[in-house]
Image (spheres, grey):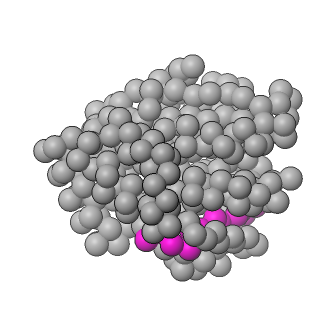
Amino acid sequence: MKVEANGVALNCEVSGKEGAPWLTFSNSLATNLHMWDDQAAALADDFRILRYDKRGHGKSDVPDGAYDFSMLVGDVVGLWDALGIERSHFVGLSIGGMTAMGLALDHAARLDSIVISNAIAEAPAPFVAAWDERIAIVEQQGMEALARPTVERWSSDPFLDSGTPVLDDLRAMVAATPAGGFVGCARALQGLDFEKRLGEIRTRTLFIAGKEDGATPAATMSRLAELVEGAEYVELSPAGHLSNIEQPAGYTAALRDFLL
């Protein structure tokens, strides 16, 4: 279904047990809400689950121009308001994990806990430059040109070598992402600036890293976890950037141990 929130129509799906605590999942850049299918199914008996396509992704609207994290965080709060959700656990991966940081910093009263997966918290110059290069490719050649290299960059060697059909599904997901949504969210990533504030977070927090993640290295995530008082840290292996997809059972077990 589509829900009007924060001035944009966001596609979302609600599932799980009615009356149970809310659990919200937020996808990475260039994916959609179906990246969480395994976790949503596994936790359906324990939570009322909300998955959504962030602005510019999946079946959500694609506003023109650059996005920023105030928009992405505001979209979640607006979605919760529209659906009558007072509080929720929040699980985000990559840009979704960064959105979790923003929620914990500015909307902690709406959160029961956060899970930050495969994320960083600031945008150093090489990171910004890499996104400029990807944006240029998309503007000149479209998303199809990024599908294969993106999935290769995300994946551990064992996952790539497995030849699993999941790799084809991921390439298709990347290729189907609206170019405007990709560029808008890439601009948000270039303005990422949460690291200096992580010590302010008081929400119960779990960091999940992929040991083989080259995009958001485990060593960086371990360091970030030390900046958040009382935060827990889990490292999955072999796992690249989409750790919940490479290690669905291990990822879900980490969520279950933390949330229940």
Q: How many marks?
A: 0
Query: Residue 69 location in percent, x, y?
Result: 45, 49
Query: In this rendering, is residue 170 above or below 255?
Result: above
* Residue shown at 60% from the left, 54% from the top: 244
Query: Residue 185 location in percent, x, y?
Result: 37, 47
Magenta residue check for 217? no
Horizontal side, residue 193 vs residue 37: left or right: left
* Residue shown at 44% from the left, 32% from the top: 58
Horizontal side, residue 130 vs residue 43: left or right: left
Q: Nearer the viewer, residue 108 or 16?
A: 16
Q: Nearer the viewer, residue 149 or 4?
A: 149
Magenta residue check for 208? yes
Instruction: Tell me if I can see residue 71 in this picture.
Output: no
> Where is residue 85, by image quadrant?
top right
In the image as oriented, which residue stretches furthest toward the left? Answer: 140
Q: Nearer the viewer, residue 169 or 233?
A: 169
* Residue shown at 33% from the left, 59% from the top: 190
Q: Nearer the viewer, residue 163 or 25?
A: 163
* Residue shown at 28% from the left, 38% from the top: 179
Query: Residue 214 location in percent, x, y?
Result: 43, 71
Instruction: Tell me if I can see residue 180 in this picture.
Output: yes
Query: Residue 131 location in percent, x, y?
Result: 28, 59
Horizontal side, residue 106 vs residue 68: left or right: right
Q: Which residues are magenta?
A: 202-214
Quadrant in the picture for the N terminus: top right
